[in-house]
Image (cartoon, rainbow, N blue to C red):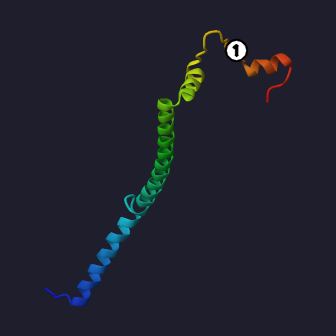
Amino acid sequence: MPVLSRKSVLRVAVAVSLTFAGVALLSDQGLAQRRRLVNEAARLRQQNVALKAETTARRGEITALKESRRFQEKVVREDLGYVQPGEQLYLVDIGNADAERGTPRQ
């Protein structure tokens, strides 16, 4: 049985290592997967920033609802259609108003 030289063993080891590295990098689990994950992480970071801003705004609304009688009345009127005794609520359909005047809708 022939004895392999140290140089030959090193060459075989390097060739096998490069083959495995190439397969790992070029396979679906390699660079393409890493790129997808980096893009997904960036998208999630942006979404997280937007959600933090929304949370801050909602906390401000909660504080205003707890502390401001004027804001409470505004929300009740706008969201629930509340009117005080003696008031009348008029609903205007802008789409129909344009049609009745003969104004073409854009």
Residue 9 appears in which quarter of the rendering? bottom left
Residue at the (56%, 23%) spot, across then down: 73
Residue 103 appears in which quarter of the rendering? top right
* Residue 3 screen position, x and y as percent: 16, 88
Q: Is residue 80 left or right of residue 15?
A: right
Residue at the (47%, 38%) spot, across then down: 59
Secondary structure beneath dot 1 equals loop
Q: Is residue 53 above or below residue 61?
A: below
Q: Is residue 27 above or below residue 65?
A: below
Q: Which residue is mark 1?
A: 90
Residue at the (57%, 27%) spot, across then down: 70
Name the quadrant of the N terminus.
bottom left
* Residue 78 screen position, x and y as percent: 60, 23
Which residue is at the front of the view, 105 or 26? 105
Q: Residues within 10 Å of mark 1 (few under 14, many from 20)?
A: few
How many discs appear?
1
Q: Mark 1: which amino acid?
A: Tyr
* Residue 66 screen position, x and y as percent: 47, 30
Which residue is at the front of the view, 8 or 46? 46
Residue at the (69%, 16%) spot, across then down: 91
- Give the residue at the far left of this rendering: 1
- Give the residue at the far top of this rendering: 86
* Residue 39 screen position, x and y as percent: 47, 56
Q: Is residue 95 left or right of residue 54?
A: right
Name the quadrant of the C terminus.
top right
Which residue is at the front of the view, 27 or 94? 94
- Give the residue at the far right of this rendering: 102
